[in-house]
Image (cartoon, helix red, strand yellow):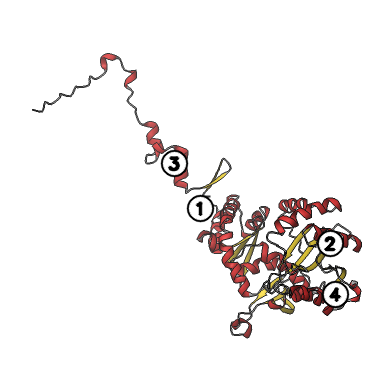
Amino acid sequence: MVTKITSPHSFKRALNYNEKKVQKGDAECIHAKNFLKDVDKMNFHQKLKRFDDLIALNERTKKSNTLHISLNFDPSEKLNKEKLIAIADEYMSKIGFGDQPYLVYEHHDAGHPHIHIVTTNIEEDGKRINTYNIGKNQSEQARKEIEKNFDLVQAAGRNSKQKENPESINVQKVKYGKSETKRAITNVLDVVVNQYKYTSLAEFNAILKQYNVFADRGHGSGRIYKNNGLLYVVLDENGKKIGVPIKASAIYSKPTLPVLEKKFEENKLKRMPDKQRLKTAIEWAIAKKPQHLEAFIKELRKDKIQVVLRTNEKGFDYGITFIDYRTRSIFNGSDIGKEYSIASIQERLSKLSEGKSFKKPIPFIRKENQIKELDFGKAKDELIGNSFKKENLADILIKSVKNEAQLPFALLEKKKKKKRKLFL
């Protein structure tokens, strides 16, 4: 079981999100705890009033008064409503919300069973329940206990499997017409926006395209572009836009351009430790002497690195992007270094195919599980020895060495003693 806790700015917004799912037939409200009426006998306004009355008791807590929780289960698990309700009640009790009113919604719009719970942290006496680090502390402990009590697939086991296969991020490619467009795009964005490290819209789109989604700013002279807007659209098998675009502001998580731009700045620091691994992987792929670009891409794929080429209308490759699924980092080639741009890589590969030795061989030497960056001159010095740095090896081998220890005593030259000068 995987848990996710968010704190929306408005309780009405969280409730409205789930109720709209119910209206569309994508969800069902299966449980209402600590309400005077049964769940099937209440409308939207009656549900909202129960929470508004509590929130009004604490005027100081205007923003952080709502909890929106999702409990996600493994796709292999078949859970009926009774079991889902029992899991929700035990979870809420273990995190300290057992006496609070809360609504439980079962959602049917994803490839795995999951429920959403909406509640408030304002109690009947107007006091606020402390939710600091609730996800790390109370929720994590509750998850482990519930997994054992209900014999659920453990999240720890699932995470270890994902490490073995980093590309499995529990989201599928969007196929137009197979599912609701907005829901399908949202599923992809929920993973990509938060789990990958990208620093530009081009890098962001490089990973989105792997799931047939594209973030579109529109034309430079258009209204959307001028207003800093952003649209999300589905791509077909040929990478062409299809269907009606969805406004970023219409998606629940609000992945708008200003939000993404903040992510760009944050990710510049987060992805820095991942650059060296990517650089090393590229060099090792070239060391295997691939004869063309396709072979180079295939070699990197073995190391869980996806290469995305940026091609213009005439079919000319003008850019290259690397997606490292192990570290979830995305780099444009030129951001790694000038020698990793598409032009430089193609030049290096062409020299390999012509049988020419490249002037800048692999600058990485593996030693005691560490990666050390050296140029070939320094590597040669390490292998030969510091005493041979400036001499030709052949000259050293034929050079006569005066070894006085092997000469007879009589032939040894006597060293003249230096006369000491007397200073008067």
Q: Amino acid at mark 2?
A: Ala
Disc 4 packing (10 Å; few <14; some 14–19; many ≥20):
some
Which disc number belongs to residue 381? 3
Query: Can residue 153 be seen in the rendering of this structure?
Result: no
Q: Could you tell me residue 216's position as x and y percent? A: 66, 76
Looking at the picture, which amino acid does disc 3 mark? Asp
Which residue shows up at 65% across the image and 54% down it? 299
- Write down the residue under mark 2: 88
Q: Position of residue 424 (x, y in %)?
A: 8, 27
**Residue receiving disc 1:** 358
User: Helix, strand, or loop for circle 2?
Assistant: helix
Q: Nearer the viewer's eye, disc 4 or disc 1?
A: 4
Which quadrant does the N terminus fall into?
A: bottom right
View extreme (front): residue:
125
| Disc 1 secondary structure class | loop
The kind of secondary structure element at disc 4 is helix
For this rendering, which residue is in front, 371 or 242?
371
| Location of residue 175 in the rendering, given as x and y in whole percent from the top left corner | 78, 70
Counting residues from the N terminus, which is met first, the one under dot 2 or under dot 4? 4
Cα gap from disc 2 to disc 3, whole angstroms: 66 Å
The mark closer to the camera, 1 or 2, is 2
N-term-proximal mark, 1 vs 2: 2
* Circle 1 or circle 3, nearest the eye: 3
Q: CA distance from mark 1 to mark 2?
A: 63 Å
Alpha carbon distance from label 1 to label 3: 20 Å
Neighbour class for label 2 at 10 Å: few (<14), some, many (≥20)? many
Residue linked to disc 4: 22
Q: Earlier in the sequence, mark 4 or mark 1?
A: 4
Instruction: Name the outermost residue toward the left.
Output: 424
Judged from the image, the secondary structure of the residue bearing numbered disc 3 is helix
